[in-house]
Image (spheres, rainbow, N blue to C red):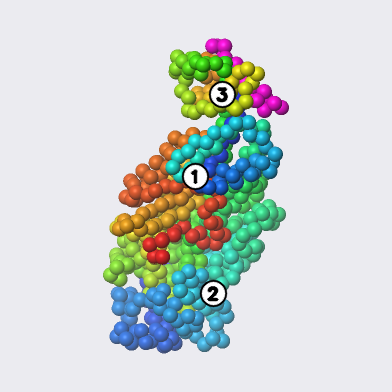
Amino acid sequence: MNVKQLSIFLENKPGHLENALKVLSDKKINIMTLTIAEASDFGIARMIVNKPDEAAAALREQHFTSSITDVLAIELEDVPGALLKALHIFSKHSLNIEYMYAFTQKRGDRAVMIFRFDDIESAKKSLTAEGYNIVKNIDIIGA
Amino acid sequence: MFNREFEAMPLNKMRELQTERLKWAIRHAYENNAFYRKKYDAAGFHPDQFKSLDDMKRVPFLTKQDMRENYPFGLFAVPMEKVVRVHASTGTTGNATVVGYTKNDVEVFAEVVARCLVAYGATNKDVIQVAYGYGLFTGGLGLHYGSEKLGCLTVPISGGNTERQLMLIKDFGSTMIACTPSYALNVADYIEKKRPDFDMRKTKLRAGIFGAEAWSESMRKEIETRLGIQAYDIYGLSEVIGPGVSGECSEKSGLHVHEDHFYVEIIDPETGEILPEGSKGEIVYTTITKEAFPGIRYRSRDITRLYREPCKCGRTLVKMEKVTGRSDDMLIIRGVNVFPSQIESVLMEVEGTQPHYQIIVDRKGAMDDIEVKVEVSDKLFSDEVKVLEGLSKRITDRFRSVLGISAKITLVEPQTIPRSEGKAVRVIDKRKI
């Protein structure tokens, strides 16, 4: 039920993100959602794509550094307070979030958010117990 | 041993031999080369004054500058018809230095290389792939002749074309490869990225003969683990003869200098005074059998230490420490002496860092500014910013504690630092521009 996230190391300079995305575009890889974390000299582009392993191989070929990380995609109600409620559950179970971002498209009437926990396994257990729907990779990429 | 008589010669006999050969060499240079004669006359030195090794301190030094000024053949000491080969240094600054060899010099060159190969465990059954560049550079032909002298099957593939190197290792059953240590790591990278199916451990390759650039113990470890071979150091300078001036033995604890051909001293690079055995300083070479291009008290600028200790391999030849740096390469950053090799050692200690780095020194106002660019490999990378920042910080802290300098660490994308298949350019000193 984990979702595979592709992360790419990029220098914080004009054209670098473009070059990386060109590699994905050439391989006809579709990006479902993307976020960039920035430090002073570098950035990390994190994204959910339809073919993560193929994307990573193509990037490696073109000398980009990348990695695949397991993250959780969680369905939330698209109403005020829904995220707050989820966060409350995370803190109750002492689950630490490293970072999070959202999908642009809704899944039916619900929102989907990506969470990167430092301990993904206990996060899964707690969230399932609390009745949250953890979206499978296969659902997201629509394959 | 390839030549036990000399390689295991008792010290007192070696000293006698060196004294006799030095007398000849100093006289040979003086009598047969105008530059030496002029220089010695001007310094008030005459070969007759050299009676014992204690008189060495009276003999004037030969410098890199002397060599450049005598481009191309000004330092040759035999008639040109006796010279059968030339090599030349790359000449990164100013003129190249051209060195010449008589037939006999070529023989000596081959012999010292053959001795090194035997010390690494080679016999005439070995297949030696010479992946140093062939040409004016001494590496290719030097290893080639040494390997043939020992009777090995010699594969003159020259440098570069990694795919082909791998093919010949497999198809020819090469047991040893000779190349620069940075190229060996390029090969390891290449296999990891492009040929994950290629298993070096399933080939017959068991040792590498690495030289032509300074390399650290941690680099040795990385080469040995990643390629599954033994990594041995071979050292030399074209001004002296080329690779084979000294080489490691099975102990990997220093390089035995072929003292019956090269007399070595350690001096204080500032004052020129001879330092007692065991001290660290600049190594000075005197060729004591060479005919075409004698080098009498040549200041190498290489920093090392000489020591004698009974070696398990049985050789009595003096040992020199792996060269840690060249006084020419030494960077003075805010008054602290730093060798690029030290920076490399620090980087190698950080798990997974490959030595693809570049040092950029600049002056901001009155302050020297040092930046070290490090390529982020897949092994170092993380999807978390804090992990990468932690890596920069760890490197910065190590630089501060080991080298006493604070450097700015910049993480850069792979393949953004220029590669070379010969010597790697590790330092850009913008203060000089």
Q: Which residue is mark 3?
A: A113
Disc 1 element: loop
Mark toward the start of the polypeptide (1 vs 3): 1
Q: Which residue is mark 2?
A: B87
Q: Which residues are magenta?
A: A128-143
Q: What chain does badge 3 belong to?
A: A
Say above or below: B120 vs B380.
Answer: below
Residue B102 visible, this angle: yes
User: Which quadrant is the C terminus of chain B positioned in?
Assistant: bottom left
Three-letter residue code for mark 2: His
Q: Residue at x 57, y 59 (%)?
A: B421
Task: Locate residue B313 relative to residue B282 in the image: left or right.
Answer: right
Q: Residue at x 43, y 69 (%)?
A: B259
Dot 2 and dot 1 residues touching (CB under 8 Å)? no
Task: Locate residue B171 relative to residue B239 in the image: left or right.
Answer: right
Number of the label disc, if any, that sits on residue A12: 1
Q: Whole-Å distance between the Cαs marked 1 and 3?
A: 26 Å
Q: Residue at x 54, y 69 (%)?
A: B138
Q: Residue at x 41, y 61 (%)?
A: B430
Q: Position of residue B74 (x, y in %)?
A: 46, 83
Determine if the magenta segment contains residue A134: yes
Q: Are marks 1 and 3 on the same chain?
A: yes
Three-letter residue code for mark 1: Asn
Three-letter residue code for mark 3: Met
